C-alpha cells in the first residue's frame, strides 16, 4: 500500500505511524532489557541467594524475596544483606537507576557511605554497562517489601574506595566463548571470589580458582564449607571431569562422585543458567592454569 504525502490527513497519518513504530521499538527494547535483567538476577548473578531472607531450614521465605536481613558472619564482620526491593522507606525505592548501579559496581550509597563485604565489588566493577542497566531495570520492578535491615558490623575500617569511579564498560562478545565464560564466572557470577584463596583479604591471583576458602557456618547453615579447586588440575581439580559433570555440579550441586555439594553455592539459581552460558563457563574453566601446576 502506497502512502501519499500530499495532503494534511496523509501527513498526519505518516506522523502517527512513525510515532507508533518508535514506541513499539522502545517497548521491545524495554522488554528485552527486563528479560535480560531477570535472567541475570535470577540465575548466574544469584542476587537473591544473599538478599532474600530464609527460614530456619535455609529456604527463601516466599513473598519476601530481595528484602534483605540475611545475616552473613565472618571473623572480620557481621553483615546483613540489604533490602534491595523498591520500598521507599526500607529499600532502594528512592534511589535513581544510576545510584543503584553505583552501589553495585562501586559499593557507594547515595549518601556517600561505603558498603562492605561480602559484596564482590572487586568483580562487579567489570559488569558491562548493558548488563548493569538490565539488572537495575529488573530490580526496580520486583515487589516492594517493607523490611528494616540492621546495620552491618565491620571489625576493621573499610577502605576509602574500591577503586576509581567506574567508567564505560563494554559488553563481552558471546562469540568469544572463553572470554564470555570468564565474564560470567568473574564479574557477573563472581565465582572466583569464593574459589580463589585470600591472604589478609587480598586475592591470590597466582592461585586463581584453586579453592580452599573456608566458610564457617555460612548464613544459617550449621556446618563448614570449603570452596573447591576448579582449575584443570587432574588430581585435585576438575581436569578429569566431563563437561556434563561440571555442569551438573554447577546447576545441581552434585559432585563427580555423586556426593552432594554444600551451599552457599547458589544451586537453586544456577539451575536456570542457559546451556550456551554453561558451555562458555566450562570453556573458561578449562582455559585456567592448573593449580598446583602440572610437572612436565
Image (cartoon, rainbow, N blue to C red):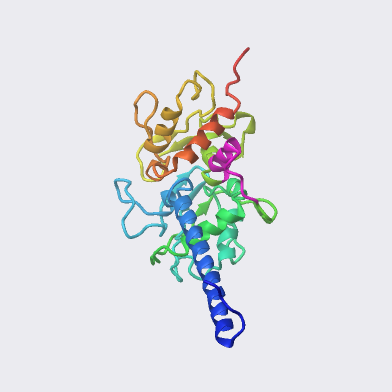
Magenta span: predominant SS is helix
- The quarter of the picture where residue 164 lies is bottom right
Quadrant assignment for the C terminus: top right
Identified at 48% across, 39% down, the residue is: 276
- For this orientation, the residue located farthest to the left is 57
- The quarter of the picture where residue 197 lies is top right
Identified at 59% across, 50% down, the residue is: 127
Identified at 49% across, 54% down, the residue is: 36
Q: Left of 255 or right of it: where is 153?
A: right
The x and y percentages for residue 162 are 64, 51
Identified at 53% across, 65% down, the residue is: 25
Task: Decide which of 248, 118 is in the foreground and name it.
Answer: 248
Task: Decide which of 106, 130 is in the foreground and name it.
Answer: 130
The x and y percentages for residue 262 are 38, 35
Indicate whether 27 appears above or below 66.
below
Indicate whether 165 appears above or below 95.
above
Indicate whether 55 appears above or below 293.
below
Check if residue 208 falls in the magenta segment. no
The x and y percentages for residue 73 are 45, 46
- For this orientation, the residue located farthest to the top is 296
Tally of numbered tags: 0
Tell me if residue 199 can be seen: no
The x and y percentages for residue 214 are 48, 34
Q: Left of 215 or right of it: where is 62?
A: left
Check if residue 180 falls in the magenta segment. yes
Indicate whether 286 appears above or below 103.
above
Task: Decide which of 255, 121 is in the foreground and name it.
Answer: 255
- The quarter of the picture where residue 146 lies is bottom left
- The magenta span reads 170-187
Q: Left of 27 or right of it: where is 252?
A: left
Amino acid at each position: 500500500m502506497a502512502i501519499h504525502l500530499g495532503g494534511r490527513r496523509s501527513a498526519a497519518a505518516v506522523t502517527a505511524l512513525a510515532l507508533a513504530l518508535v514506541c513499539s521499538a522502545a517497548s521491545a527494547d524495554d522488554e528485552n532489557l527486563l528479560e535480560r535483567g531477570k535472567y541475570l538476577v535470577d540465575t548466574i548473578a544469584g542476587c537473591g541467594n544473599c538478599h532474600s531472607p530464609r527460614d530456619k531450614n535455609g529456604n527463601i521465605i516466599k513473598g519476601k524475596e530481595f528484602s534483605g536481613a540475611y545475616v552473613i558472619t565472618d571473623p572480620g564482620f557481621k553483615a546483613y544483606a540489604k533490602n534491595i526491593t523498591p520500598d521507599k522507606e526500607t529499600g532502594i525505592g528512592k534511589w535513581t537507576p544510576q545510584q543503584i548501579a553505583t552501589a553495585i559496581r562501586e559499593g557507594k550509597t547515595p549518601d556517600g557511605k561505603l558498603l562492605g563485604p561480602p559484596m564482590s565489588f572487586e568483580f562487579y566493577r567489570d559488569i558491562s554497562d548493558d548488563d548493569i542497566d538490565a539488572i537495575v531495570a529488573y530490580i526496580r520492578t520486583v515487589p516492594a517489601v517493607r523490611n528494616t535491615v540492621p546495620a552491618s558490623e565491620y571489625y576493621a575500617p573499610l577502605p576509602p574506595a574500591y577503586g576509581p569511579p567506574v567508567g564505560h564498560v563494554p559488553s563481552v562478545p558471546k562469540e568469544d566463548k572463553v572470554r564470555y565464560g570468564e565474564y560470567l564466572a568473574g564479574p557477573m557470577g563472581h565465582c572466583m571470589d569464593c574459589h580463589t584463596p585470600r591472604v589478609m583479604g587480598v586475592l591470590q591471583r597466582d592461585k586463581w580458582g584453586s579453592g580452599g576458602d573456608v566458610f564457617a557456618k555460612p548464613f544459617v547453615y550449621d556446618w563448614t564449607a570449603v570452596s573447591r579447586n576448579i582449575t584443570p588440575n587432574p588430581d585435585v581439580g576438575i581436569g578429569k571431569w566431563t563437561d556434563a559433570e561440571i555442569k551438573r555440579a554447577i546447576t545441581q550441586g552434585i559432585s563427580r562422585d555423586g556426593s552432594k555439594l554444600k551451599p552457599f553455592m547458589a544451586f537453586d539459581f544456577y539451575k536456570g543458567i542457559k546451556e550456551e552460558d554453561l558451555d562458555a563457563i566450562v570453556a573458561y574453566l578449562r582455559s585456567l592454569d592448573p593449580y598446583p601446576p602440572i610437572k612436565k
